[in-house]
Amino acid sequence: MVRLILCLIAVILFLILFIPVLILEWVLGKRRPDLRDISSMHIIHGIFRIVLFLAGVKVTVKGKEKIPRDQAVLYIANHRSIFDILVIYTQFQIPTSFIAKKELARIPLLASWMRMIRCLFLDRKDMRQGMKIILTAIDYIKEGLCVCIFPEGTRSKSKDESELLAFHEGSFRVATRTGCPIVPVSINNTASVFEDHLPFIRSAHVILEFLDPIYPAALSREEQKHLGEQTRQLIMVAIKKNHE
């Protein structure tokens, strides 16, 4: 319980004490959105690292050298915990947008910071709005902004963390329409931090692995139609390997 209280205090203090900074970021975004993207990213890196430290999370990162450095990429990751976002975001070196569920857009201040790092809020029940989100993500890639998607659409609750939900193929249009590389990401053991024993937070060792990028242009049209399942299988194999 102590870890949970410390993490909550850290987040609440950040949201309240950084209101002036949030305003400055908003002003900066009006004039230099590129600088706002970078500064907001570093600010969020800082608070995420503090929360991970207070939660007692140790992170082992593999394959970071595989990430293409000369262009925007689409990150595709499995999703079991709210800590997935903290763990993966602290590894990004250039501004990266997330596609998040629309419910988060209702949380004061938190939603404002999410918008500062260009998060997109998705209504999973509205297909038309979902297509607009994908089109916006495509524009982000063209601007040079990376995008991170959890294509399962929600957190997997299977006892076996290698059993992933089906990946929504629509998520991969961001890559097939722009030609950007897809970087699959496997995340192990984040549910052990919080979800496996609610409402307690316990220390855990998390393994994050960036896999070899997939280049849609090198695939046939038929292969592109099944990118979701192909990527899902790659991530499942990595999760099983790192679990062992």
Image: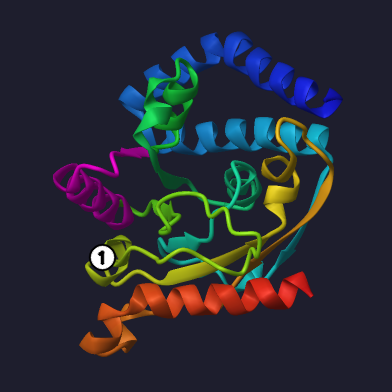
Vertical order, 191 against 69 (above or below): above
**In the foreground, 63 or 199:** 199
Q: Is residue 13 above or below residue 123?
A: above
Q: Position of residue 166 (x, y in %)?
A: 41, 66
- Who's the residue at 38% across and 51% down the image? 145
In depth, the one of 161 and 231 nearer the eye is 161
Q: Which quadrant is home to the C terminus?
A: bottom right
The one nearer the camera, 20 or 35, is 20
Residue reaching furthest left?
Answer: 128
Question: What is the quadrant of residue 241 in the picture?
Answer: bottom right
Quarter of the picture containing the N terminus is top right
Q: Does the image show residue 3?
A: yes
Residue 235 picture location, percent across and down: 55, 73
**Residue 91: % across, % down:** 63, 52
Label 1 secondary element: helix
Amino acid beneath label 1: Arg
**Where is 77 relative to 229, above or below?**
above
The reply to whether residue 214 is in sight is no
Residue at mark 1: 173
Q: Residues within 10 Å of mark 1 (few under 14, many from 20)?
A: some
Residue sitting at x 64%, y 63%: 161
State which region is magenta.
120-142
Q: Which residue is found at the position 63% from the left and 38% from the top?
A: 45
